[in-house]
Amino acid sequence: MSLDIQNNLENVQTNLAALSAEVISSNVQSVEIAIQNVPAATFNAGTESIKNETQAAVTEAKESVAAEKIVTALAPVLTQTLTKEAQDSLKAISTAVASPTDETSNQKIADAITQIETVVPAGTIDSTTVTEAVQKANEFYADYLELNGFNVQNTNQTITALNASLTNPIEVPSLNNLLVGISAKGIHTTTANPIVAAAALHISTGTKTLTISANKLNLNFSAGMLTEATIPANTEIKVDSTISSLKTTFTVNADQSVLTNGKIALNTATLGSLSASLATQLNSFSLKGDTVTVTAVIKASPVIAINNDKPALASKYTLGTTDGSGVSAKFKVTQ
């Protein structure tokens, strides 16, 4: 690691600790790695190395949407060598964001950012934009996609029910008709062009597994409702399993709708329509009597949330080559 990179890394670690301490200690909602949004221009050569090295510190401290937002907004500052006064200003920002009911918090944030702007190179931050972003840190995102749970055998299972199933599995006759619900909020409620995503579904009994993934999935919304879910031609579908006969990779020859009752049907029934030869092989993946963990993942550029009385960031999962946001649940298959 070069000296410049090492210096930047040490700055990030020191400044991040100052900025996030109070916010992190006052929130419990998990967030994903905030440092991923650091503009590349703020780093010298070795940007990815710096990001990779700083991920651990942020991951350990990922406690709130607020933390993610303030780190993203102030990311260009974090690589700088700051005076004690500037670091104290970062701490003041953290304290103010952690105290949203304090009527003076917005002014404290503005004052701290103004002070920081005087000690970093000109143009490092736009104080007006950064101040507004930090002052709104405790607000949830305005624009996002929301995972609404599963529909299994024509019964909707909410996020609340799916969370509870991790300790008390939901009894179902079969998982052959599993649908994933998703809706859009804010600017994504109506899309002139589809939101391009990748998707994966993972089914595991502990002794046998099945993972189905598509590297491209086009989603269209109208008034927030999912109106089209299409696997376009030339999309790669990968099936991985502990059952060797199920392992396959193939390319879809023509656009294929996977929309069923306003939900995404990336399941075994859908695969049967994509590849007739696979349908027969899938019958060997019997789940009768098993307790099954099901995880559905969507990878897309909008923020992906769940709603359990209030919106929250969806958990992150990596299924094969698909790393995205998703939801997991347990089912007891009775037939």
Image (spheres, grey):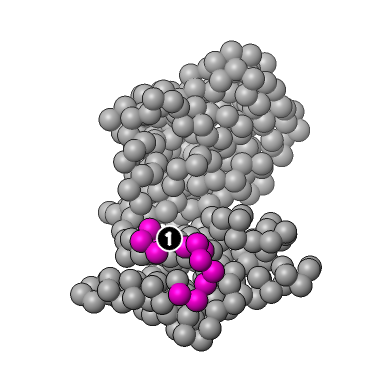
Please, what is the dominant secondary structure of the magenta stretch? loop
**Nearest the eye: 165 or 38:** 38
Say what secondary structure mark 1 lies in.
Answer: loop
Residue 193: name its quadrant.
top left
Q: Which residue is mark 1?
A: 126
Q: Residue furthest bottom?
A: 84
> Which residue: 35% across, 51% down?
141
Mark 1, Cα crowd under 10 Å, few <14 / some 14-19 / many 20+, is few
Determine the residue located farthest toward the left in the rendered image. Answer: 103
- For the view shown, which residue lies furthest in the right direction? 1
Specify whether residue 162 is in view. Answer: no
**Residue 118 in the image: x percent, y percent?**
45, 75
- Residue 126 lies in magenta, yes or no? yes
Q: Nearer the viewer, residue 236 or 96?
A: 96
Point out the stretch of residues depicted in magenta: 118-130
Residue found at x 32% / y 65%? 135
Q: How many numbered discs sit on the rendered protein?
A: 1
- The residue at the point 36 percent across, 64 percent down is 131
Q: Is residue 209 left or right of residue 99?
A: right
* Residue extending furthest toward the front: 122
208 inside magenta stretch: no
Residue 46's quadrant in the figure? bottom right
Residue at 79 percent of width and 68 percent of height: 1
Image vertical order of residue 24 relative to residue 125, above or below = below
Asked whether 239 or 326 is in front, the reply is 326
- The picture places residue 31, in percent across and down from the top left corner, at 47, 60
Q: Residue 334 placed where, x, y %?
A: 47, 38
x, y percent for residue 230: 49, 22
Residue type (three-letter) at the residue carrying disc 1? Asp
